[in-house]
Amino acid sequence: MSSNKSSPPTIYDVAALSGLSIATISRVINTPERVSEASRRKVMEAIDQLGFVPKAEARARVLQNTRRIGVITPFFTSPSFTDRLRGVATALSNSPYELVIYTVDSARRLDSYLSTLPLRGNLDGLIIMSLPVSDEAAQRLLSAGLETVLIECANPHFNCIVVDDYGGGRLAAQHLISKGHRRCAYVYFGEHPDYSIHPEVERFRGFQDTLNAHGIPLPESYIKYVPVSRIGIREKLRELFELPERPTAIFAPADELAIRVIHHAREFGLHVPDDLSVIGLDDIDIAEHIDLTTISQSLAESGRMAVELLLSRLNNPERANQQIVIQVHLKERGTTATVDGHSETEKTGSDSSR
């Protein structure tokens, strides 16, 4: 610890408290992937305890803005992430800020970014997409004064954009009910990284509650988690399609999965939508091209709104935080149809467009 209590803590104080070298402290701040998890945690605990701020960051904040906005996002193999990221990039293209993307493929990588990015001083603002922020990480962001917007994660300390996932499940059920379906199944990806957000939980709850409210059961045999692999999905769907009373409709809470369901249904000789109705959720770009009925969550728009919130705070730090709820809406296209003999007289109150 520094002997002058009025002086800000230095990197030497961090080294003394953590019991690690100056070089290790520097690597934790600048290249954390080169440091062991145990050493990184020791350093971050010392930094938090001392309230240490690297000189480079302090100098950058005093002298000038960096004109860089960071986005932490899951490793974007999913089309929904790329669509949302496109909204961020488009909004920033009309600003003086450069976009810097940090992809996350593990819990350790997420923790590393949330620990060290606030200390580096090379960002003016940060957008965190579809990833959880712990209380510890939130405190670091706040202490560093790094303006942050969260997407798909609510936190009272930050501007947030959240999606009405429960409403998405409700709309999917309402649409299928309006088409006369009473044998409705729910198929979802059962493998999720431990560091990610799980919106399908609320989507399922909205779907199930709405079916129950209309007296329509959702038996366990109609609820299928599927692995990501092609063979795994096919076998799980086989179980559904070979039931004595197979479902007449399937809700997949992600368009990517809905598209796979349609593909495999055709392999089993089922015609969509004549034999099987399929509805997804997201409204990714390809959904319109393949005529997929889906629930839209305005992916690109949520990215644009995140930038708008962030820039407004950078221009006016005293502006109060907001939590904006993205309202979902039905995009009725060609993969859902009315059950034979049913007249579409029931109004669901949902917004549909073709």
Image (tube, rainbow, N blue to C red):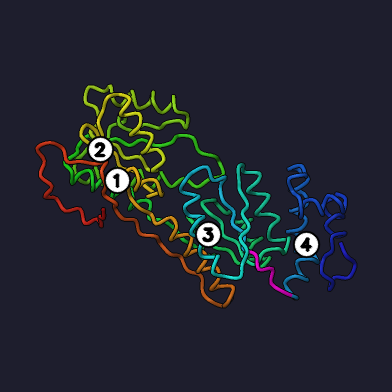
Which residue is pictured at 44% across the width and 24% down the height?
231
Numbered badge on residue 135 = none
- Comparing labels 3 and 4, the label whose residue is closer to the camera: 3
- Against 320, residue 38 (above or below) is above
> For this rendering, which residue is in front, 335 or 24?
335
Q: Is residue 140 left or right of residue 34?
A: left
What amino acid is found at the position of numbered circle 2 in the picture?
Ser
Element type at mark 1: loop
Of marks 2 and 3, which one's residue comes earlier in the chain?
Answer: 3
Q: Position of residue 151 (x, y in %)?
A: 50, 57
- Crowding around mark 1 (Cα neighbors within 10 Å: few <14, some 14 to 19, many 20+) is many
Q: CA distance from mark 3 to mark 4?
A: 27 Å
Q: Quickly name the residue at label 4.
A: 50
Q: Quickly name the residue at label 1.
A: 293
Q: Quickly name the residue at label 3.
A: 150
Which residue is pictured at 21% across the width and 26% down the height?
245
Q: CA distance from mark 2 to mark 1?
A: 9 Å
Q: CA distance from mark 1 to mark 4?
A: 54 Å
Q: Quickly name the residue at label 2.
A: 277
- Comparing labels 2 and 4, the label whose residue is closer to the camera: 2
Q: CA distance from mark 1 to mark 3?
A: 28 Å
Which residue is pictured at 23% across the width and 43% down the height?
176
- Against 165, residue 5 (above or below) is below
What amino acid is found at the position of numbered circle 1 in the picture?
Thr
Element type at mark 4: helix
Of marks 1 and 4, which one's residue comes earlier in the chain?
Answer: 4
Element type at mark 3: strand
